Image (tube, rainbow, N blue to C red):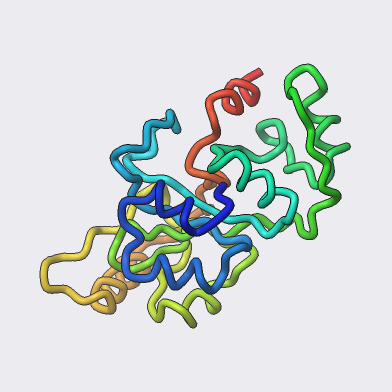
Amino acid sequence: LVGSTRAAMALVDDLGRFGRDLMDEFWPGPLTLVCAATPSLSWDLGDTKGTVAVRMPMDPVALDLLKETGPMAVSSANRSGSPAATTAVEAIEQLGEDAVAVYLDGGATESSVPSTIVDLTYAVPRVLRNGAIPIEKLREVCGTVIGELRKGPQRPTPRKAGETGEEAAAAEEASAAESPAPETRPVAEEAAPAPEAADRDRD
């Protein structure tokens, strides 16, 4: 989580063609952008394959906190397999008072719908998880956006030399149409939880 676009830029090596436009349109708000991480990012985020997922939340208390602390590596306020807490009371009920040092109560969240996650590491933006921002809104900003994959955990093919974004999108859509569509794979809210959050989820 970041408290400003400038903070996000310090974590990201490449926003691609549309990253800044998406930030300007939907931040602060429920849009998570997966980008190539800056080589100087030393956080232990797990195996993210050189990427970082960034989001600027639309919550005044969270933004004030982030402007004081700087970017924070986070997970949802819940135990693994349980729904995310929408109030401080729900978070305390799930996590207890021993596992968490401080609960900051900013009131109930306005929506339980998770953020939309978009991968910007390829020439054509791809939705990794459908969420609060529909793909139609994303296409108003980016033009071509590939929908959420529904055929297993594979990443899109990088664009070939000389191939336009539209050509790459058409090729991927055609490839997806040739395969059956089993259940959508689950995608984490953020690129990876902070180490202490990961330990908590395993408890």
The one of 170 and 68 positioned closer to us in this rendering: 68
Residue 49 in the image: state x and y as whole percent. Answer: 33, 40
| Outermost residue, left side | 161
* On screen, residue 11 above or below 124: above
Residue 62's x, y, as percent? 69, 48
Residue at 16%, 73% (x, y): give it.
Answer: 163
Name which residue lies at 69% across and 49% down.
64
Q: Quadrant of residue 167?
A: bottom left
User: From what the image shows, is residue 65 above or below residue 179?
Assistant: above
Q: Nearer the viewer, residue 24 or 170?
A: 24
* Relative image position of residue 144 (x, y in whole percent): 38, 77
Residue 66, quarter of the rendered image: top right
Q: Residue at x 80, y 30 (%)?
A: 94
Give the farthest residue toward the right: 89
Position of residue 170 relative to residue 62, above or below, is below
Place of residue 95 in the rendered image (x, y in percent of width and height, measured from the top left):
77, 27
Going 38% across and 66% down the picture, which residue do you hit?
Answer: 125
In front here: 187 or 32? 32
Determine whether, in the image, residue 5 is placed left or right of residue 167: right
Quadrant into which the C terminus falls:
top right
Left or right: 141 in relation to 13 = right
